[in-house]
Amino acid sequence: NISFDAKDGEIIALLGKNGSGKTTLLKNILGLLTPSSGTILVDDKDLSKLSVRDRSKLLSYIPQSPSNIWSYSVKSYVLMGITPSLSTLSSPKERDEAKAINALERFGISALADRDITTLSGGERQLATAARALLQNSKIQLFDEPTSNLDLKNADILIRHIKSLSKEGYIALITMHDITEALNIASRILILDRGKVFFNDSVDKLNS
């Protein structure tokens, strides 16, 4: 019984206790789980009927702790973000590599471009994953506890990035635990309780 709309430019903070359904909701949107009923639509397209490639053109995911990462350079890892837009058997061009470096610079980690991704700290890896999502250029970006592994400086970089994307019309759906941080980042708050929507309204409405 979870139903909500997301409009261009919205930053939606998804709040709730452990077990409230936040992660399950993200997995349904990503296609890792199948909804027991209802549909998930993006621009009137049923996500369950799209190929993985087409779905990844619409959605990108920045997990709390990126896992299952193989030994690639950070630049190569970020370049994987353009995979959905490449034709069969084609490979990244010089302009794509330049975009990857620019994405790393945006997050202040361009000096790590030639490092092995597996040697990075959890926070550095999360920023690299955010840079990869930036290259992926998906309309909707899903963040799972995005600042939990970051120090204050890097958390601020990521928050400013999310706000910047919203001004460009991107949609961000962010699972969070800290309501104070949610009020600082989000334009709308969605609170789940035992798999149902408990609150769904603007930050201003919650403050009032």
Image (cartoon, grey):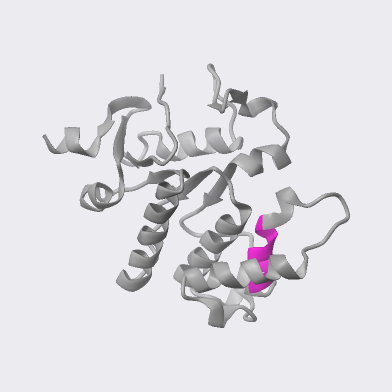
Magenta stretch bounds = 75-81
**Where is the C terminus found, in terms of image quarters?**
top left
Q: Main secondary structure of the magenta part?
A: helix
In which quadrant will I find the N terminus? Answer: top left
Left/right of residue 182 with respect to residue 99 in the rendered view: left
Towards the viewer: 23 or 157: 157
Is residue 106 something that shows in the picture? yes
Residue 204 image offset from top left, x and y in percent: 18, 37
187 over 144 or under it: above or below: above
Q: Can residue 70 be seen in the rendering of this structure?
A: no
Q: Nearer the viewer, residue 101 or 47?
A: 101
Identify which residue is drawn at 30% across, 37% down. Answer: 188
Name the image quarter holding residue 2. top left
Residue 31 image-quadrant placement? top right
Q: Residue at x 58, y 23 (%)?
A: 44
> Which quadrant of the figure has residue 207?
top left
Looking at the rendered structure, the number of numbered marks drawn on it comes to 0
Residue at 41% across, 47% down: 166
Is 77 in the magenta? yes
Task: Point out residue 170 in the picture as x, y percentages from the top left corner.
Answer: 47, 44
